[in-house]
Image (spheres, rainbow, N blue to C red):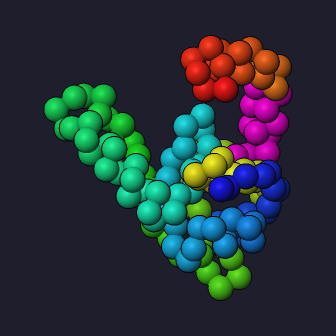
Amino acid sequence: MLIGEYTHTIDDKNRMSLPSKFRQEMGKKVVVAPGLDNCISIYTVSQWEKISEKLLDQGMFQTNSRSFNRFMFGQAVETDVDSIGRILIPEHLKGRANLKEKAVVIGVQDRVEIWSDSAWAEYKTVVEKQADTLAEKMGGAGFI
């Protein structure tokens, strides 16, 4: 399971180290894709295949499905984790997530998300204020 929060730097060639714990769980090849809430998501190849199958099941005859598939697959990139644990962050995704020199890398169970440090701090502040309410809503739906 991918969990935890880490701050890493992005070098001038758009490379960033993955935390060693994440590298061990994710392997030597990952898929870097647009995430929701203006972050970048990183998936193992097997997790990406599961997501691909679910999105494929939505069909191409629904406008929303076509649009979301284009958004996800059109911007996704399969990349290698190099010998010292770095991945290349594509420029188009780096700009979309407004990443500069520092990024926050978080484990979210089955994926890794990369956030700009300022966007993550802002998001975390908002969610922390709502945590009790969110937990109650999830509990009412049978999640907790």
- 87 is higher (above) or lower (below) than 91: below
> Residue 60, percent across and down?
19, 38
- 94 is higher (above) or lower (below) than 21: above
- 72 is higher (above) or lower (below) than 133: below
Q: Main secondary structure of the magenta part?
A: helix
Position of residue 63 in the picture relative to residue 107 (left or right)? left
- Residue at the outermost bottom position: 83
Which residue is located at x 21 percent, y 38 percent?
59
Position of residue 31 in the picture relative to residue 82 (left or right)? left
- Residue at the outermost left position: 61
- 6 is higher (above) or lower (below) than 22: above
Q: Is residue 91 visible?
A: no
Between 78 and 101, which is closer to the camera in this rendering? 78
Between 14 and 8, which is closer to the camera in this rendering? 8
Between 68 and 134, which is closer to the camera in this rendering? 134
Asked if the magenta segment contains residue 120, the reply would be: yes
- How many numbered marks appear? 0
Position of residue 109 in the picture relative to residue 132 (left or right)? left
Asked if the magenta segment contains residue 8, the reply would be: no
> Residue 81, percent across and down?
59, 75
> Residue 99, percent across and down?
69, 50
> Residue 4, percent across and down?
78, 52
Q: Quadrant of residue 37?
A: top right
Q: Split into 4 quadrants, where in the image is the N terminus?
A: bottom right
Position of residue 108 in the picture relative to residue 123 (left or right)? left
Which residue is located at x 31 percent, y 50 percent?
53
Q: Split into 4 quadrants, where in the image is the C terminus?
A: top right
Which residue is located at x 71 percent, y 15 percent?
136
Question: Which portion, as a residue range, is magenta?
Answer: 113-127
Which residue is located at x 43 percent, y 56 percent?
48
